Amino acid sequence: MSEKKERMTGARAIIESLYREGVEVIFGYPGGVLLPLYDELYDADIRHILVRHEQAAAHAAEGYARATGKVGVCLATSGPGATNLVTGIANAYMDSIPMVAFTGQVPRSLLGNDAFQEADITGITMPITKHNYLVQNANDLPRIIKEAFHIASTGRPGPVLIDLPKDVTTDEIDFYYPDKVDLRGYKPTFKGNLQQVKKAASAIAKSSRPLIYAGGGIISSGAHEELLKFAEIIQAPVTTTLTGISSFPSGHPLYLGMPGMHGTKYANYAIQESDLLIAVGARFDDRVTGKVQSFAPNAKIIHIDIDPAEISKNVTVDIPIVGDAKNVLASLIKHVKKTERKEWIDKIQEWRDAYPLHYIKEKNNLKPQFILEQINEVCDDAIIVTEVGQHQMWTAQYYKFKEPRTFISSGGLGTMGYGFPAAIGAKIGRPDKVVFNIAGDGSFQMNLQELATAMQDDIPVIVAIMNNGYLGMVRQWQELFFDKRYSFTCIKGSVDFVKLAEAYGALGIRVTKEDEVKPAIEKAIKSNKPAVIDFIVECEENVSPMVPAGAAINEILDLERKE
Amino acid sequence: MRHTLAVLVENKFGVLSRVAGLFSRRGYNIDSLAVGITENPNISRMTIVVRGDEHVLEQVIKQLNKLIDVIRVMDLGAEESVDRELALIKVNADKDNRAEIIQIVDIFRARIIDVAAHSLTIEVTGDEGKIEAIENLLKPFGIMEMARTGKIALKRGSKSP
Ligand SMILES: Cc1ncc(C[n+]2csc(CCOP(=O)(O)OP(=O)(O)O)c2C)c(N)n1
Ligand SMILES: [Mg+2]
């Protein structure tokens, strides 16, 4: 394709480049150095969502990316605008989510002068971006944008930042968008090595207790169908990490739920008993492995990952396969045979029957687990986003996810305040879906200003607050390990969330009893406007089961609260 | 264990801090780092000497390879390589001991590149052992200042990367 060169400003060139990358929405917030670019956005064919805090722009871009599989785009001005993006960029980096962040910068002549609203954002974000650019010549804009989208979305995905000095956006260039990128230092391995695939297949044939441990890589590579097929052929049970949730159908007889600290007992027992652990797109995070020396002590390990640096980083791997999860699983499927493993499957069923996830219902106390079951009953194909804390773990445990990209949660960084803006991004990407943000009363307060964004742009997400009056997850640790000394974790009664919602013009509903739960959820969905449901729940409910920090994952405790 | 890595990188601004940051954030210690352009002006070569066990080395190499601006990483410890370092040493010298110092310089096939009333500046090239040896011999005279380039290295033989 040979495009005619056209004369235009840097700002215009950015817009033209975004068109060519198929960008349909930008989450942003303007400022002085972005004026030329915002002037172009004024009548561009790209939707712009004006957030109320730049952190939310980054999280919303990430939520959009997770819900759609496309690259999320956010935009912030220089200095404080750029530094406000940092948490969101770090979050996307930790969970390997494709994102391109644009930041304004002071003009080139002022760089390094401590000019007004200058921040060295490329320096600041070096360790939390896959790559970043400070554009020094407007002619480089199309190439850099092309590269940024390519880097963000291929290999192990991640955020890329482009810093735009103001005068770069006003300089004129002859616009030409390259067809290809030419990056000799960046050639991710896509196809798995056939020898390694064969080795893995033969290990699988020899195994009597194989187990698949699948992570976020399944979702980012779109390998869910291959995963299902593979698991069914080799009859291996499947456990999915927090970021892998929704990559395998919850109701499936081979599904074990989440492993690790707040995983199911049967997933953890299965890992410890397994003789062959097949890790796919997962990274042996410490929340999964517990005491790493005691993790999967009887298992050989096959590790399939697109990032060679993950291989043998935390645990020593016997058969590494570097490549794209979808590609490698498809090729493995060709080399494995249908196998029956009745003994192993029966054993797992025994554990499943003996140690199901459970909680104790109480007459006058609303339980968050019950609410999640009710949300599931009312709407079993929603996109469920969460904040960070106990409510996040209960969501991972109790909602039955059926299709990929329907569970969106901050895994690696564990960012309170992530959920609400991410839910806004998800809803924009998937307007056909009902989107819930399962929130804690603490977390929601970290980005609740986005109610204004949701109202202004008419983005009907439902915030379901599990209001326990505590920074519950921290309180739980204080209860268990610090003698119930609840040091600065009580936030009871500090805000009326219903009035708050109403102040923004959103729907606010308070729920205190079991029989009000379903009608409230239904009302919120029906209203088709931003809604906040304030579920007043038991304050000292604990997430159970739990592997204490530093213990092996089969040393898992029941913590349900008794009346 | 010490390892010598040769890292070919894009000759772009910021590359040095990307590489240095990668080490410091993981608590890996760099013993020395030398950078310069190669036969291709778009490519720079970094020679990095790091300390660590095999696991650390493997992670360092993999993490370096993840940087977009890194084109190639070679572990020169594992292969036959030639390496050199250059040092400039300014040492106290007066008419009584000047001859003795010049003798040491000759033995090491070093050179005197500046002579002043009370000092000599010596240029010496060699492997680390040689540089440390001359440093030790000059110490008694009083070393006023010293600068070392850090090691640079190439693989032996006619193969190029
Ligand atoms: C930005 C941020 N600050 C602090 C923490 C530490 N932290 C983890 S969970 C949690 C409590 C969350 O409280 P809430 O949102 O009410 O959820 P709950 O655990 O009560 O369900 C805290 C403070 C964090 N994860 N993120
Ligand atoms: Mg709470």
Image (cartoon, helix red, strand yellow):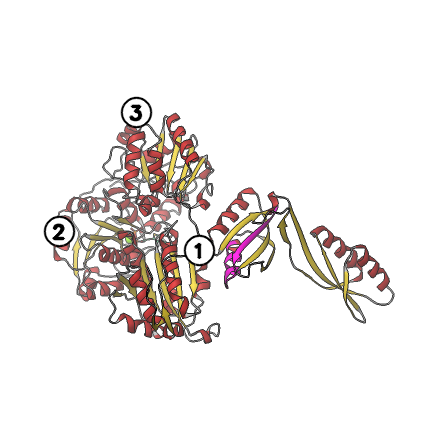
| Residue at disc 2, secondary structure | helix
**Extreme residue in the top direction:** A343
Disc 1 residue lies near ligand 1 with CB under 8 A: no
Mark 2 or mark 3, which has the lower sequence index? 3
x then y, percent, for residue A437:
24, 53
Characterize the local packing of mark 2: few (<14), some (14-19) or many (20 or more) Cα atoms within 10 angstroms: few
Specify whether A455 is left or right of B67: left
From the image, tell me which residue sits under label 3.
A340
Specify whether A330 is left or right of B59: left
**Extreme residue in the right direction:** B96
Mark 1 or mark 2, which has the lower sequence index? 1
Let me know if residue A447 appears in the view. yes
The image's mark for residue A513 is none
Q: Which residues make up the magenta segment?
A: B1-22
Res B37 quadrant in image: bottom right
The image's mark for residue A183 is 1
Q: Which is nearer the eye, A302 or B136?
A: A302
x then y, percent, for residue A189:
42, 45
From the image, tell me which residue sits under label 2.
A522
Amino acid at the residue labelled 1: Leu
The chain letter for the residue carrying disc 3 is A
Image height of A101 relative to A548, above or below = below
| Residue at disc 3, secondary structure | loop
x then y, percent, for residue A63:
29, 55
Q: Are marks 1 and 2 on the same chain?
A: yes
